[in-house]
Amino acid sequence: MLGNLLSFFAAIVISAAIIPLMIRWAPRLGMVDIPDPRKVHTLPIPRVGGIGIVIGALIPVFLWVPLDASLHAYLFGSLVLLAFGTWDDCRELGHYVKFIGQFIAVLVVVYYGDVYVHTLPFMDLVPLSEPVARAFTVFAMVGMINAVNHSDGLDGLAGGLSVLSLGCIAYLANMADHGATVITIAIAALGGVLGFLRYNTHPARVFMGDGGSQFLGFTLGFLAVYLVQKVDPALSPALPALFLGLPIVDILAVFAQRVYGGMNWFRATRNHVHHRLLDLGFDHYEAVVIIYSIQTLFIVSAMLLRYDADWLILLLYLGVCALLFLFLTIAKHTGWKAHQPHTISRLSKLVGVMRQHTLLTKGPWRVVALAIPLLFIMVSLLAVQVPRDFGIGAFILAVLMALYVGVIGAKDSIVIRVITYVTAAFVIYLETKFTGQSSQLFHTIALAYFVGLTVAIGFAVRFAEGAQFKTTPMDFLVIFIVISIGILTRQDAEQSQLAFLVAKLVVVFYGCELILSRVHTRWNPLNVATLTALVVLGFRGLL
């Protein structure tokens, strides 16, 4: 578990550190997405996020995964796609040149890495002939690369869908006996995407570009085949339809419309699901949340039905997809719109009234600003044990924090943010594993603390005066993930502990971000508490 956490946070830190640098260099490299009539954004946006995603995801794999032929092929294919994707983001390559990179990456995985589909749904585990199996796998993986690439049409959309699928793959691998490799790859890729998403949620500061979207499609395709065919062959071969989810049916529907309309198969158009939702009057935020919700339904179903019959899995998948497209078609033909202009809901009026009360505009913010620094210091002092690797990491982070805040004089930088988030992860892990394990009173106090902190953050986000922190579709994505973990782990003590750890980590991350968005002085309480906690943990872990 600890190794996976290190992979996850290393990927987040690397991705989050690289992307701001790439944003600055994007104009010089020509990696800027210019608006056109098909696109949703109206201003030029750097498309360099994929570089941060790929580097952040691959470094932990290099460091912590034993490499064999399959992994060598995966890493090679990832770098090929990054190279071709970055080239396309700079020079706008044609589709056929991009296909060259995609086929190179996939062919190496299938023929050198020996990762390919052996059985298909409804075949009663009768294997395909090897030539047919390998050819089918090449076709399917190239299709998945393009499915994710084409889903990258709204801020946060492709990244969020990939996070859900990667989380599901990691969960399924964790249920198997030999899933360590899949877990680490999925967790590292998930961390790379999360490091990118805070720059990409609406309104986006950066796009992932083809370098990122092709890598994510390739990774999802590779992991789907590796998981179902090698790690746990007892899983239904139809299961990838659910955990890969909406991008598959979306691209198939788009190609069907292009063929029916006599259009070029590979020419970009505005007939993806997200475009059709926007055309029905849903705003950007709502369209992304709707698609996240459908993908979450698929993901949870995949986790619950992982060993069920192929027909049941495909019936569920095709049934939900059919209902979605039926709704889109009927709504278009009847002229239905999601919003009527110049209307204000009763809820909006109530929120406006509540914003006038000082108790809601100032009180919750003060609770958050005090509670999280106090948590950092208390856990660093009360933890029964501090692992040595935590002590080493804390000492290094303390030196960096002191350098940036005390010597350089930085008030707000990505480095300070990343150090704060990593410290929060250390604190929550130690609080969960090494404090008050046998004390019912401690558990009661801790539960009351986190419930109260959650309520305070919710009110502060919604009502605090001058707050720059705004909810985004990514926040709904995180909520979906936490709820799903809670549902799926409620009957297993060890998994339940993991669910509570994730839930607490999410709450504290949001609290840290709320504080960092409002306080810009060097020696604010959160910075002081972070540095203090790191120093204490460093000494305790190394002594």
Image (spheres, helix red, strand yellow):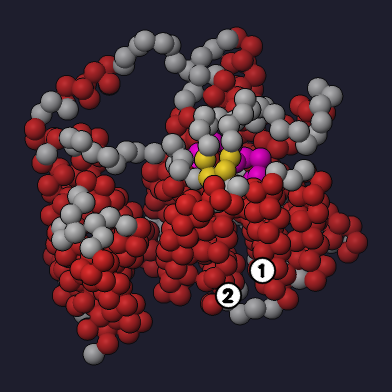
Quadrant in the picture for residue 374: bottom left
Mark 1 highlights which residue?
A: 75
Position of residue 291 in the picture relative to residue 36 (left or right): left
Badge 2 vs badge 1, beta-carbon distance below 8 Å: yes
Which residues make up the magenta segment? 147-156
Q: Residue at x 57, y 20 (%)?
A: 279
Q: Residue 278: in sight, yes or no?
A: yes
Classed neighbour count for the residue bearing mark 2: other residues with Cα under 10 Å, few (<14), some (14–19), many (≥20) = some
The N terminus, quarter of image: bottom left
Question: Residue 379: within the magenta?
Answer: no
Q: Residue at x 61, y 29 (%)?
A: 36
Outermost residue to the front: 28
Alpha carbon separation for disc pair 2 and 1: 9 Å
Going by the numbered disc 2, the residue's amino acid type is Phe
Position of residue 466 in the picture relative to residue 187 (left or right): left
Can you give x and y, in whole percent of width and height, for residue 153 in the image?
59, 36
